[in-house]
Amino acid sequence: MFFGRREEDAQRLHDAALACLAEGDTAGARRIAASLRGMQWSGAFELEALAFRAEGALASAIAVLEEGTAAAPGAWPLLQLLGTLRDQAGDHEGASAAFDAALRAPGAWQASIRHNRAVSRLRAGDPGSALADAEVALAEPGSPAFLLDALRVGIDALHQLGRAADARSLVRTIDATLKVEDVRGHAELSGFAALTAARAGASREVVRAAIEAAVEGWSSRGEVLEAMALLDAEGEAPSVFRVAHSFPAPPDAPSDVVGYVRVVEVRAPDRDTAAALAVTLEPGAVRAARTLEACEEVAVAPGRVGVLGASARLWHGA
């Protein structure tokens, strides 16, 4: 534990290292972590582990966290990250042990740890336990940052358990907790509603209406694409096209943002059809203002017509 300026300085350095990682500067993050080790700041181990993971050295990242949790056994963030990385390495038993230890640590953020353990348990083929953990994470008041990710675990667990109706009900329950003015939040939940409806065998009209609500609310999560893929096929085509197009920013965007670019992969019979399908992922308010930057055939891969994938919206200034 630190007091006064020393703790403030350590936190400032920690934040600086996280900024380095966000920029891909793993060497810079590791240099700062070395300084923090000298200050006996447990977050140094987290930073080193994240740097190793970014470099693809997962075993080294795990080794650093094991060293850190031995030195600071009460640091639940280190234990949580250790559980996550062990899970990514396929060590589900070791991941479970780390998450359990994290939950026992003083001051542990129970909802965050249970969410991460839910992800691990689902990956390990235990949807029942994953659902139990996800429900705890979802019950935390105040819409935590991982709400949608925890909801995804919940609906996937219910899907694996054959409880399609319960998955739809869970989405409606979470949607009801959002404020009326949370337009973006409701749009994201519409994407979940579309996916759970499609999985439950709802009519094309019901699924399509939920997809449209998500798109019109600027949702760009993968649930929308997955719901689209579960709709009845509208024919087959031989080629995959990559469409790059740009649009103006929505009215509520920050003043320094003027628009965005998005790249979409589509299977279609020709370029015109590919461009037309790609634009269906954007709200109607901006479709007419689209600038088609490129539409190129990238593969011959026969299959059903439709959108295969899409990038995030890449926002830009003037």
Image: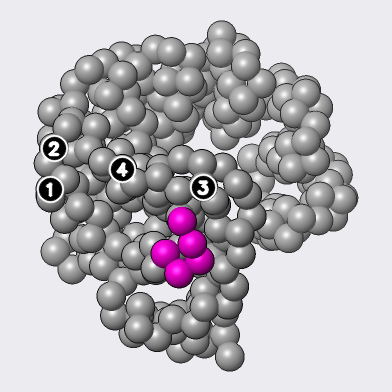
Q: Secondary structure at mark 3?
A: strand
Q: Marks 3/2: CA distance? A: 29 Å
Mark 1 neighbour class, 10 Å CA radius: few under 14, some 14 to 19, many 20 or more: some
Residue shown at 31% from the left, 14% from the top: 128
Q: Marks 3/1: CA distance? A: 29 Å
State the residue position of label 1.
206
Of badges 4 and 1, nearer the viewer stands: 4
Q: Secondary structure at mark 1?
A: helix
Is residue 270 located in the magenta-colored stretch of the structure? yes
What amino acid is found at the position of numbered circle 2 in the picture?
A: Ala
- The x and y percentages for residue 60 are 81, 27
Mark 4 neighbour class, 10 Å CA radius: few under 14, some 14 to 19, many 20 or more: few
State the residue position of label 4.
233
Give yes or no for contact between labels 1 and 2 (Cβ–Cβ under 8 Å): yes
Is residue 166 located in the magenta-colored stretch of the structure? no
Q: Which mark is residue 238?
A: 3
Give yes or no for contact between labels 3 and 1 (Cβ–Cβ under 8 Å): no
Q: Earlier in the sequence, mark 3 or mark 1?
A: 1
Q: Earlier in the sequence, mark 4 or mark 3?
A: 4
Task: Specify the segment rendered in magenta.
Answer: 269-273
Q: Marks 1/2: CA distance? A: 6 Å
Q: Earlier in the sequence, mark 2 or mark 4?
A: 2
Name the image quarter holding the C terminus: bottom right
Residue 150 location, quadrant = top left
